Image (tube, helix red, strand yellow):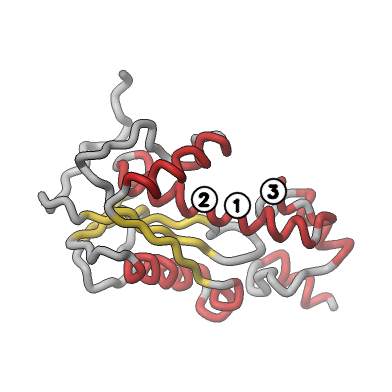
Amino acid sequence: MSESPFPQLIIDYQGHLLAGVDEVGRGPLIGAVVAAAVILDPLRPIAGLTDSKKLTPQRRAELDVEIRDKALAFAVAEASHAEVDELNIYHATHLAMRRAIDALPLIPEYLLVDGNRLPGHHVPGQAVVKGDARHPAIAAASILAKVARDAQMVALDALFPEYGFARHKGYATPEHLDALERLGPLPEHRRSFAPLKGQLELL
């Protein structure tokens, strides 16, 4: 097994009510930012948990089912595209994270949050850079959030197939930018993001 490129993760908590928290959807031009919080069961470990971006869609879907079955608690929440525009993506991301933590059916005693900032929740915790590759609870949260947001994009694709959402998941790919140029933005597009902002200023 190769050595981890990250320093050892030292966690200032020893109990089992530790919630991993992560989000998906900071970068896309459309839709909600989705966050998840997961309290894993130490007696029911799940093999193969890692950064959701490193997994195939099929493997993510399989792990999503297993996490929901085996975790002590989990919750998925979001901040809408309108909240992203109103608050900015940074604050909307933290809002989605706080909503996921608050929606957990068990109250966590400690949080491990992916990234370099805590979301401003009253439960103590620590931020972990590249946390989804360093702790299974954060990886589990990243998988639930990714599967949920991708499903939203597939549903949007069914309504507006000409935009290609099932393929690019709302990110600023050439295909998506070309569709925006030809067809204009949908109500779900984030007006505050640069490509939309520039386009709207030209109208």
Amino acid type assigned to the residue bearing label 3 in the image: His
Query: Residue extending furthest top?
Result: 1
Q: Quadrant of residue 159?
A: bottom right
Q: Quadrant of residue 186?
A: bottom right
Residue that mark 1 sits on: 150
Q: Quadrant of the N terminus?
A: top left
Residue 26 or 71: which is nearer the viewer?
71
- Mark closer to the chain start, 2 or 3: 2
Element type at mark 2? helix
Q: Residue at x 21, y 68 (%)?
A: 123
How far apart are labels 2 and 3 at the CA level? 13 Å
Residue that mark 2 sits on: 146
Element type at mark 3? helix
Up/down of 16 relative to 123, above or below: above
Q: Are marks 1 and 2 in contact (CB under 8 Å)?
A: yes
Residue that mark 3 sits on: 168
Image spot of residue 29 (x, y percent): 66, 62
Q: Residue at x 60, y 77 (%)?
A: 82
